[in-house]
Amino acid sequence: MEDAAKLPLPEAFLNFLHSNGIDPSIYTAIHSTPRFIRLKPGFEDYIEEFEAEMKCKVEKLEWLEGFYSLSHDIQIAGSRAYQEGKIYGIDASSGAAVTALHISPGDHVLDLCAAPGAKLCMILDLVGDSGSVTGVDVARHRLAACRTMVQKYALGDRCRLFVADGTTFSVIPYQTGESKSEESVDVFKEWTSRRPWKERKRASRCGTPQLVSRDQPPELIYYGRHSGVVGLPKGELFKTASDDEIASLGYDKVLVDAECTHDGSVKHIQKFEHWGWRTLERRVLDAERTDHLHALQLNLLTNGFRLLKVGGSLVYSTCSLTVAQNEDVLEQFLKENKTAELVEIDAARNWPCKGGRIPKTWRFDPLASQTSGLFVARFTKVVI
């Protein structure tokens, strides 16, 4: 692949960057942007063995606990540490978005756009042996990959995964940590096993993305023993709650890492050299596409906030650096939601990033942060 520094970025894309105040030189920074790994808790002493196996030096990130940087050209997928579930491949900016939630053991956490799963696994590690984590994604094949990741890292005990439209998802956390009987497990498995999973896997192998519609009910594809699913009648599992009930029984923390144009990812933009710049114009620059994304992002943020309990925290993030997909979404959301309050992210004091156009928001980019591009903002729900 041609160096990013030599990529002939099309004039339409350069104009797009200029209109959003984005420095085009971020797309030349790929060789100065390191790769990042996160150690699974309990394997902190494994780092020297990893360095010896990969014949590389890793550096601990002082601003993000559990994260290390290494040379961009190191491929971790073949390492024993990765194959044995001791390390994760995840960009530091994504880790920062999870850290901004300030998750505590016992929290009930919703990841509304969960696939492919690296952030979900980090959330599960932080929740630990109490609380629960609910992962939602509109794409069945992507959530199946998420399920595989959860199982690989043995994190599924307090996790449940739903194929659902994040703009309409309404399942609240079940407020118990009690283990149910084996009989209850078998009863639940009986009705979940009736779903035509083999047919779904066959369709996925054919390469056709399967997206659920807004009016399609949630589909549970994975649950752990302590995820609040085992022992529940089917009607109870999918029971919706009123806004008054959600105020006290909703999620403690919600992550909305919304679908976007991915223009903050240098590696993603590089792919258009092979996909064709016309593809970039259709996926990133097309006005109809960006208008659709703005509406989708606003709806995801609005629904995620609806499911948040009073006093809880919601983090909104995208890997776009555009104003339309970040600050514009936030401004419209705040106008329409009087109980939403934008709050400081305490951890951001140590982040190597820039402030956004709205106070209390933050932007990572390859030049300022030596990470992939990411926008991050945090809200809380107040009583008025």
Image: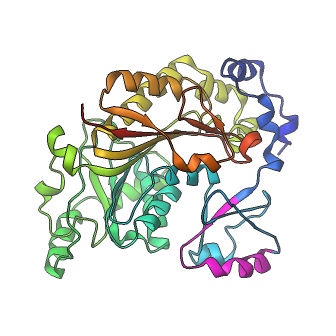
Question: Does the segment drawn in magenta span residue 5?
Answer: no
Q: Nearer the viewer, residue 229 or 277?
A: 229
For residue 123, which quarter of the picture?
A: bottom left
Left or right? Give the position of 31 relative to 173: right
Residue at screen point 33% across, 23% down: 336
Q: Looking at the picture, does residue 120 appear above or below residue 42?
A: above
Horizontal and vertical percent position of residue 153: 49, 72
Q: Nearer the viewer, residue 339 or 68?
A: 339
Q: How is the image coloured?
A: rainbow
Question: Does the segment drawn in magenta span residue 40?
Answer: yes
Horizontal and vertical percent position of residue 30: 79, 46
Residue lying farthest to the right in this orientation:
6
For residue 88, which quarter of the picture?
A: bottom right
Residue at screen point 15% across, 45% down: 245
Horizontal and vertical percent position of residue 179: 21, 76
Q: Is residue 116 visible?
A: no
Left or right? Give the position of 346 relative to 355: left
Residue at screen point 27% across, 71% down: 226
Q: Is residue 41 visible?
A: yes
Q: Nearer the viewer, residue 73 or 227?
A: 227
Left or right? Give the position of 185 relative to 359: left
Locate the C terminus and report the quarter of the image it occupies.
top left
Horizontal and vertical percent position of residue 346: 53, 48
For residue 86, which quarter of the picture?
A: bottom right
Q: Count the marks: how many?
A: 0
Q: Which residues are magenta?
A: 36-54
Q: Looking at the picture, does residue 58 appear above or below residue 361?
A: below
